[in-house]
Amino acid sequence: MMNLAECSPKCIQTKSSNLTGLENGDGQIIEMKYDFNRLVEKNYPETGTLNDVIYTYGSPSNSVNGTGRIVKVEQGDNFIEEQYEYDDMGNVIQEYKLIRI
């Protein structure tokens, strides 16, 4: 894990210490968006939407014990999709991965 002091000035943070931007080697900023301190999106500027990632968290009524946990990860324009199901203790018991080519 990177010490944020080592990261500066190439990192951009919110007051709640969420990393909202990270400068890559080409000087472009990788953007990160949050909802209630949970990472919901990463945007990579140099690849368009090919490598962008969207995280979906389970709702309180989630039937696979995913409440508050990541239940879906999408990369690119529907290129890769991952879904997760959890047991009563919060352990991943099912993982589905779909890669469209």
Image (tube, helix red, strand yellow):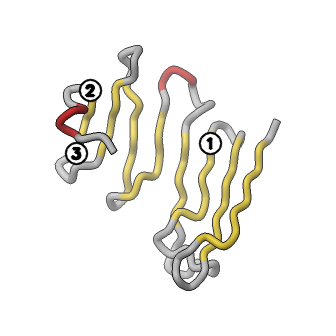
| Kind of element beneath mark 1 | strand
User: In whole angstroms, how far apart are the C-alphas of marks 2 and 1?
Assistant: 24 Å
Say whether disc 2 or disc 1 marks the residue closer to the N-terminus: 2
Residue corresponding to mark 1: 75
Q: Nearer the viewer, mark 3 or mark 2?
A: 2
User: Where, quadrant-wise, is the C terminus in this rendering?
Assistant: top right
- Is 62 situated above or below 24? below
Pointer 3: what residue? 14
Q: At label 3, which amino acid type do we have?
A: Thr
Q: Residues within 10 Å of mark 1 (few under 14, many from 20)?
A: some
Q: CA distance from mark 3 to mark 1?
A: 24 Å
Quadrant of the rendered structure where residue 4 is?
A: top left
Marks 2, 1: nearer the viewer: 2
Q: Quadrant of residue 66?
A: bottom right
x then y, percent, for residue 12? 25, 35
Q: Where is residue 99 shown, x and y percent of the image?
A: 77, 44
Q: Which mark, residue 10?
A: 2
Q: Position of residue 8 (x, y in %)?
A: 20, 30
The number of numbered discs placed on residues in the rendered structure image is 3
Q: Residue drawn 55% across and 37% down?
A: 52
Disc 3 and disc 2: Cα gap in Å? 14 Å
For residue 5, side relative to residue 57 (left or right): left
For the residues bearing labels 2 and 1, Cβ distance under 8 angstroms: no
Numbered disc 2: secondary structure? loop
Q: Are marks 3 and 1 in contact (CB under 8 Å)?
A: no
